[in-house]
Image (tube, grey):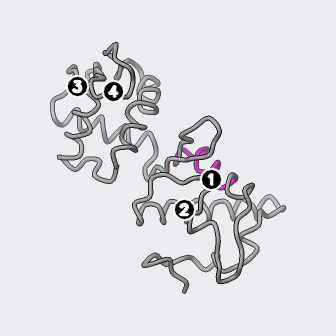
Amino acid sequence: MQTLGEFKLPHFFNYPPYFTLQPVRDTREKQIQLWKELILDYCRTQKIFVVGLDEDFPLFSNPVIERSLSHEAREAFLSALVAEGRAEWLDKSHKKILILWHSIKDWADLIISFVKDNGLEDGVMTVEEIRSGVESRGTAGQMNQSMFEVITRGILPHHLASRNGPYYSNASPQTPGTQREACTLQRNFS
């Protein structure tokens, strides 16, 4: 079995047709599913958070069989992760993607649990205070700083707002992304 470092690659990685988008719908759906699982597993075990569509990513080519994914195939596999809620595009041009080992809903639930378990409802905290607290208590130890910031500043507020009320609001006139940006967790979680 072929490996990338200590990561064991699945058997399909040595099968040349899997490096070409398949024209038959059922076959393509299976192909996309296998690639989604491979990308998530590899990124989780290698602690990779961001993948560039046009960058040299180890899974996008297999020198043993002299095959590489086309731009179209890369985009199809990464877009499928986004559609499933397992990734988010980091830019409008869809060149970089944030890989989510948990869905946004699961990350939101982890953060809400942290807030609830630590009696922090109805308090005002900076995003940095939440990140530091979450990391120190192990709730989201898998997240690096940039992943946490993308989730708390960009994605989480929209998810929480759709969950019956104002869990989160930007309570600071500061520019988003500054150290002093604050958020308010306002909902009674009981």
Percent from the top left, x then y, of residue 111?
30, 38
Relative height, residue 152 to residue 15 (above, below): above
Query: Badge 2 local density, few (<14 within 10 Å), some, or many (20+)?
Result: some
N-term-proximal mark, 3 vs 2: 2
Q: Which segment did they paint magenta?
A: 76-86
Q: Residues within 10 Å of mark 1 (few under 14, many from 20)?
A: some
Residue 81: say if magenta: yes
Residue type at numbered disc 4? Thr
Nearest to the observer: residue 32 or residue 53: 53
Of residue 137 and residue 179, the one placed in the foreground of this image is 179
User: Vertical placement of 97 versus 20: above or below?
Assistant: above
Circle 1 — which element? loop
Find disc 1 in the rendering and name its residue.
53
Q: Secondary structure at mark 4?
A: loop
Query: Sequence-wise, which precedes: disc 4 or disc 1?
Result: 1
- Please give the residue where the numbered disc 3 appears in the rendered image: 125
Type of amino acid at the residue the image marks with label 3: Met
The quadrant of the image that shows the C terminus is top left
Q: Disc 1, disc 3: CB below 8 Å?
A: no
Camera-near label (1 vs 2) is 1
C-beta proximity under 8 Å, tags 4 and 1:
no
